[in-house]
Image (cartoon, rainbow, N blue to C red):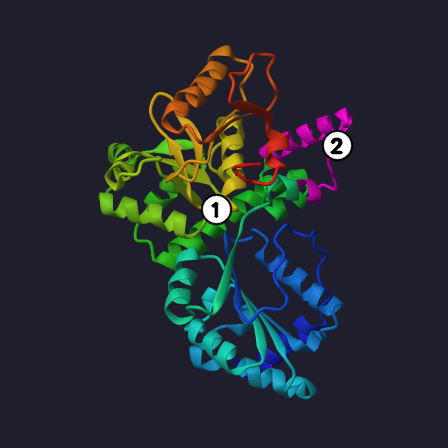
Amino acid sequence: MRKEALKYVLTENTARKFPVTVPRTLELPLNTTKITTLVGIRRSGKTYILYDTMRRLEAGGVDRRQMIFLNFEDDRLMPLKSRELDLILSAHAELYPDFADRKKFFFFDEIQNAPRWESFVRRLHDTQDAQIFLTGSSSHLLARELATSLRGRTISYEVFPLSFAEFLRFRGLQHEPYSANSDSRIAAALNEYLAIGGLPEVVLADPDLRPRILKEYVDLVFYKDLVERYKVANPALLRQLLKQCLSQPATLLSPHKVYKTFRTQGYELSKDTLYRYLHYLEESYITFLLPVAERSIRKRAMNPKKLHAVDWALGYPLVPEPFIDVGHKLETAVYLHWRRQREDLAYLGGEREIDLVVNAEQPELLVNVTAHVDRPDVYEREIGGLESAAGRMPRAKRILVVQQIPARDVPKGIEVIEAWRYLLSIPAADN
């Protein structure tokens, strides 16, 4: 990285108008002594949250020349060496000498691409009058380095694709209480949400372009965030695993069965390789593996995990959309509704499965989700699972989330709620 090239980048970023953004639910603190870190899958909106934070700072009287924004995927910064990171400070001081002694606000996007960034950021935090904001696309990379070098200095936030409430905001829709027409509009919007997913760029794109954007996005994630980052030796195997995971949201995944299936398909692999590749998908925020609600570590390890994708639309470039069940999409939407707030989630296995258990150690809430409540056998199965779980988890609230309230009797102690209404609620076990 040359200083003169860096000056061009800094000048351009300082002069550039902020892009138009739709505010997200997550709003970063503007006055904290901690390093603020955003982690999440690529293109989930992390950069735009930084832009929104910069806009709020400017509205509060902070001069743009106090803000240093760098995207470490900018090719003009390449090749980047760790000893060259100090050029950022000297280049900024030469460009804006009148601001050399004033508080600075550093916004470093995709920081994991900068070698030994953690040492540089720690020194900035310890020696400069500065507030630091970081984004990264790998939870493992940032978590490991934050834990070792920046312990006690950081506050981290996860960024997911749009929630249903954010999707409505992007669509310019707002629910009007006690309005049947508004209820119908929001229910229709949920169908659209389940059809196109929550990636901001996809939501805002022309419908004809969405398939192309999703395909290019999946390819980018596969090659850059998986194959290149983890130096994958068998990309064909990883591609097949990615396809299986993204095309089957809200299903049970048994690594042993996947191993046997791949072997019969002619793939050369070991179980260690399969487990490692599954771990890569989790580290990159592409998939989540929900454990069974068992206190026994052995039982949790032995049972299959329930698979959820960070966005069900990522499966569309790999299998046709109709092959991804709408009920599974809805279940994943409900899971993500909770996962945005907390991680102590599980499912309950067996013949009477519970799709989501909140607080597996001391269950607070049991949730079943179905889009096919018009079928009597499905309704009885979902209600039966919640009734059966009452004896095992008597203190847990029980909810059935459906797309349309059925004209059926509901057993005492079970609440049936429309999916759109539930996804707009504040996720709290006692709400």
Q: Residues within 10 Å of mark 1 (few under 14, many from 20)?
A: few
Residue 296, percent from left and from top: 26, 38
Q: Is residue 251 above or below residue 149?
A: above
Q: Which SS class for mark 1?
A: loop
Q: Quadrant of residue 396?
A: top left
Q: Residues within 10 Å of mark 2 (few under 14, many from 20)?
A: few
209 to the left or right of 335? right
Q: Which SS class for mark 2?
A: loop
Q: Which residue corresponds to the image point at 63% horizontal and 31% vertical from the top-left?
A: 420
Q: Which residue is mark 2?
A: 177
Q: Main secondary structure of the magenta part?
A: helix
Q: Quadrant of residue 229?
A: bottom left
Q: Which residues are magenta?
A: 167-194
Q: Are marks 2 and 1 in contact (CB under 8 Å)?
A: no
121 to the left or right of 140? right
Residue 256, percent from left and from top: 25, 35
Distance between mark 2 and mark 1 Cα atoms: 28 Å
Q: Quadrant of residue 301?
A: top left
